[in-house]
Image: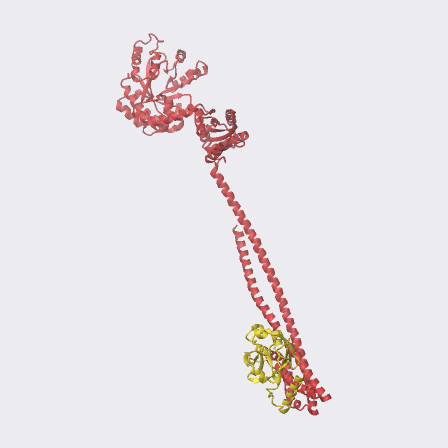
Amino acid sequence: MKYLFFTIVAVVSLLCAAPISYAQNLDAVALTIDGEIAGDGPRNFSISELEALGSVTIETETPWHDGKVKFEGVPLDRLMEHIGASGKTAFVIALNNYRTEVPISDFSKYPVILAIKKDGIYMPVSDKGPLFIIYPYDSYDELNSELYYSRSAWQVRSITIN
Amino acid sequence: MPTAFNLFRVIAISVVSCLTLAAISHHYLFNATENVVGRSMRHDIAWTGTNGRLEAAHFEKYVARFGALGTTKDAEAAQLYYQILRSRLSTWNSGVFRKFIESSPERLELLNTVTARVENLETDIARIEMPDARKRVLDALSEISPVIEQIGAETFINSMQQSSAVRDDLRYHQELYYWLFIALMLSGVIAIVFTAYQNRSLRLAHLAEAKQADKLFFLARHDSLTKLPNRSAFEAAYTSALERKTGDDQIVIAAIDLDGFKSVNDLLGHAAGDAVLIAVSKLLTAETLNQDSRNVVCRIGGDEFLALLWMPSNAPMSMEFANRILKTLSRPLETRFGEIMIGASIGMATSEDNAVDDLIVSADLALTRAKVAGKGVALSFQPDMLVDLKRRLRLEADLGLAVAADQIKPYYQPKVDPSTLQLTGLEALARWRHPELGWISPAEFVPIAEGSGAIFKIGKMMLDAACRDAISIPSDISISVNLSVLQILNDDIVDVVKQVLSSHRVPASRLTLEITESVMMTDTEKVLDVLTNLKKLGVRISLDDFGTGYSALSYLARFNWDELKIDRSFIQGALCDPMNLTIIRTVKILAQEIDAKLTIEGVETHEQHELLRGIGCDTAQGYLFGPPVPLADLEPLLLGALTGKQTKGKDEKKLPVDLTDYVIAIN
């Protein structure tokens, strides 16, 4: 929790410093992953660190946007590989306390990404940022269902692998 | 059947249409259900709506806490939730949720207002630690929150309505599926029922066909009139009977021929003839089956029947059986034409007779013999019948050559005046001396010659020979020649007679043509016509064998006969039965009336001669006065005749010829 707190403080101070701008601190901790992963204890990632893992693009329609939207982000299976996830389920918690469970098999089955940018711009909290789990809905019919929509968490803050 | 067939076609087409319709309906229903299920899986806006309510509540809570407690953490949380709420409102203004909002203009206006109010709070949120800013935020929230609550609640209601619609659609589809299922089941049942019906029709048609085939098979093996087996069926039964026969059985074949059937046909018509055949068939079937159920009776054509009889071995039952049949058939037959009398002749052959080769042929031979023997009798096959048959075939083969080889010659029998014993005429009789078989009686070869057509040659030869011989016979002695029925019915007989007479220059008055009474039975009009033409030539016409056949006295009235020859049986029976003499006397009176001469045939004894003298007939003929002899042997008689003329009244009882001479001559 102290990391969370730290992050919030960082975010808030940033917002205080530049209240009009939504410019984000790309080096602040944005995501914490814990649970059954390699190494001791949780891992923290800044937006920059996540981007460093390599980005892919998904262009798709969603129920929450008008028209096609272009998302860029790190493929989740690559992220899982990176952290050495050995569990079966990713328990995802969002800033708004939204919680969901995603089978890790989804990440290999579909090119699911943890989106960082929407239409080339980093996503602020007010636009479902900073991290958004995006499935390639247009490419797979079965993804256009309530089940996958519920797994598509926005404002992602932490992931616990179990 | 055509109506049923059309009905079936209509039903079959209906069932197929029904099935096609059901398949199409199923396809659309399936797609519609898929759509409904898809709808049920679509993004549920209630979720977005509810979370919006929570986020607004959290935001308000953190602003209020910060105001109450002044904790930095709450300030930061309030600022975060402000961003989160803005994110939520942006979601509400996009995509699926936006469509829901736009479905109600009031709702759209409310949301637009709320969104604007929230965006306007940005400055105050940044300065949240300032009490006036905080107050403005809380004031705004007191207006914003109910709207968010309301829209959130409406999404929930909308979601419930949509779920309900989905459920209703699904239930409706389920009901359609149910009726579709019922329709399919009914189609199936109708198809099965009509298939069964069609199968039944086919089965009935098949049965009818089989029945027809049975009928045709029956017709092929049976006589259509009497329903008795026909010849081929009988022969099959006969063959199988011979195979099945054990030492305890004997097979008897009886050939049965009706007597007088032709008369029934001629006098009563063919329908009556058919009725007789049917009645006889029933009687024969009853009699034979009564004797043994394995027995078979068949009709082989006309009025001929064959019976196959099973009898115990070594039991001479066949004759008893045959006589029982004769007795049964001699009773009047009950027919729809009334009672008809008929008789039958039977020939039989049994498998126990070693001499018998083919039972049917042997029975037939015995039948032939039975008919010759006088009808109404039953005869068993005897080996000599086969000899007769062979002899008959031999004679038939040899007869054609006999005339050319001069084997057949005329013999002459004297005709005398019984009171003066004066020779008045000679009857030319054909005699055949076969080079190997010896003398063949005319009674034997004439029927054969009539059957083979040789009778024309023989008849012409006899006429020719008689006319030639007439030249060397005193002119006051007439010459008689017999004409057979076939000769008379043949068109050129008048020309033949005329030509023969002229070629030998014999006056027609010297020739007498004799025809038998039976000739008159064939074609009376034609015979009378021919006889009239012959008589015009000047020849004399004599009615031979008078009194034996179906003597119809009308013949006597319709033709001007020159001579009546009363059959030999009358004079020969005259001594035993005076009735015969009475008949002869009567015929004598009759002859006088029609101006014909009366000739008595078959006079063999002095007693008979004495009787004749009492009656006073014109001419007599018989062995007493001389048998038939060759012309050369007649010379003493001709001399005697001349002598008789010269010694007339000298010794009336003296016979002109010694009989024994002639007997020796013909043997």
Q: B631 or B408: which is nearer to us? A: B408
Q: Is any atom of residue B550 visible in this view? A: no
In the rendered image, which quarter is residue B187 located in? bottom right
In the rendering, what colour is chain B? red
In the rendering, what colour is chain A? yellow
Left or right of residue B300: residue A13: right
Question: Is B589 drawn above or below residue B73 in the view shown?
Answer: above
Q: Position of residue B255 (x, y in %)?
A: 46, 29
In the rendered image, which quarter is residue B465 located in? top left
What's the image's color scheme?
by chain
Left or right of residue A5: residue B559: left
Left or right of residue A31: residue B648: left
Q: Position of residue A98 (x, y in %)?
A: 65, 79
Question: Is B561 drawn above or below residue B239 in the view shown?
Answer: above
Tell me how many marks there are. Answer: 0
Q: Residue at x 59, y 58 (%)?
A: B186
In the displayed image of the protein, which residue is found farthest to the right? B68
In the displayed image of the protein, which residue is found farthest to the top? B650
In the rendered image, which quarter is residue B92 located in? bottom right
Q: Residue at x 57, y 74 (%)?
A: A108
Question: Is B212 drawn above or below residue B43 in the view shown?
Answer: above
Q: Position of residue B317 (x, y in %)?
A: 52, 25
Q: A150 or B7: which is nearer to us? A: A150
Q: B643 or A45: which is nearer to us? A: A45
Q: A136 or B537: which is nearer to us? A: A136
Q: Position of residue B277 (x, y in %)?
A: 49, 32
Q: Is any atom of residue B233 visible in this view? A: yes
Left or right of residue B250: residue B476: left
Q: Quadrant of the C terminus of chain B?
A: top left
